[in-house]
Structures are given as C-alpha cells and as structure tokens.
Amino acid sequence: MATEEKHVTTSIGIKVSVSVAVRTAIERILYGLAQQHTADAEMACKSGKRNDELNDAIRTIILATACLEAFINQEAIQVLDQDFDAYDKGFIDAWGKTYRKRRGYPTLEDKWFEITNRISNKQFNKGEEPFQSFHKLVELRNEILHYKGIPAAPVPSTCHHVPGVIPPERAKFTAKAAKAAVESMRAMLEKFHILTGKQKQAWIK
C-alpha cells in the first residue's frame, strides 16, 4: 500500500499536508485475467492447439490462486491490522495468540480457513466443496511453482486431437483444469461472503 500526500486548506485558511493510504485492487485484475485465459484455453482446445491450451491453463491456475491469496490477505489486513505481519510470518495465530515457537508461514489454505473464522466465527468445511476443489487448485499451483521435472510414465491422452499417450503435465494442465480453477476461485469468494455476511463485490461474477 502506497501513501499519497495531499495539501488541504482548512476553513480558516491554514494550509496543511495529510497522507492518504491508497492501493491497487490487484485481486480484481487477477480475477479478470484468470477468466480471460480460461476462455483462451477452451478456444485452443477446440482448435486443437495443444501448446496454447497448456500455456493458458497454466496461466489460469497461477492467476486464480494469486487472486485468492491477494483477496484473503486484504481481509486479513483489515481484521488483524498491525498484527498482520506477525500472523503472515507465523509468529501469532489469527486471534493474536503468540506462539512459544514460530509455527511457520500460514499456508494459503490456512489463511482462508482461519481468517474467515476470525471474521465471522464460522468455518469452511475442509471436507466439502468449495474447499475440496480449492485444495486441488492449490496442489496444481504448487506443482507448477515448485516443479521438480522428474520424468514419469506417459498417460493416455484425453484429447481427441492428440492420440496415443502424453506426458503427465499435459494431462493435468488442460482447458478442463483451467475451467475448474476459475470455478473454484469464484466459489471460494462467494462462500466467503456467505459465511461472513459481507456484501459481495461487483467484480465477483
């Protein structure tokens, strides 16, 4: 978050400087980009352009998880205020309780579960939707960001335009996976607003 200095003249003619906190709503931009690349992945799939489908599916998965992280971080900042940094680094929990030994950085799934609970005293059910699909989305994101490149046996192709067998990555990062990523992103945002009672923002659609 950046600060912007403004000069204000008071009613009695005294000129003073005030700082106003501002930020860019990156989560909204990421949401739109994820939707855009999903549509591109589906178009590439229909056209038989497998490389383009793979590229756009990977972009979608990364963007969808980035959107969810940006969103929940903003909610955490609002509710935790000055304690957010300590929470984000694993020194306290979502209620401000200090750990005797640092627990480590909270995962993205931790944040969604804990911050939602802190705001509303209600929890996502980790064994049900949409959290289950969210968990799968995070796993796919992690496979991309922490890619090991370990060779594996090829798997049967599920695409009519790519017969035979293909590498496991090509079977995972598809237009179908991209669509599931966007659906998971949207479902998590909608469920958050249901649980917390907050008004859903207009860009979530």
Image: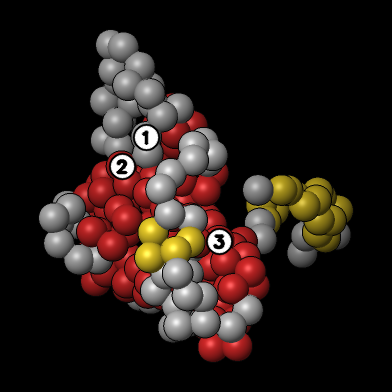
The residue type indicated by label 2 comes to Asp
Q: Disc 3 marks which residue?
A: 58
Determine which quarter of the picture holds residue 48.
bottom right
Residue shown at 20%/66% (left/top)? 129
Return the x and y of residue 124 as percentages of the image width and height.
19, 57
Q: Give the residue type at disc 3.
A: Ile
Q: CA distance from mark 3 to mark 1?
A: 24 Å
* Residue 181 appears anywhere in the view: no
Q: In the displayed image of the protein, which residue is found farthest to the front?
A: 164
Dot 3 falls on a residue whose secondary structure is helix
Which of the two marks, 3 or 1, is nearer to us in this view?
Answer: 3
Asked if the residue under mark 2 is in contact with the one under mark 1, i.e. CB atoms within 8 Å, the reply is yes
Point out the frontmost of discs 3 and 2: 3
- Mark 1 = which residue? 106
Q: Quadrant of residue 193?
A: bottom left
Q: Earlier in the sequence, mark 3 or mark 1?
A: 3
What x and y, as percent, mark residue 89?
45, 27
Residue at (41, 48) in percent of width and height: 153
Residue positioned 49% across, 32% down in the render = 85
Nearer the observer, 107 or 148: 148
Residue with the mark numbered 2: 110
- Side of 97 where 32 appears, left or right: right
- Closer to us: 148 or 132: 148
For the residues labelled 1 and 2, the Cα–Cα distance comes to 6 Å
Q: Is residue 98 left or right of residue 66?
A: left
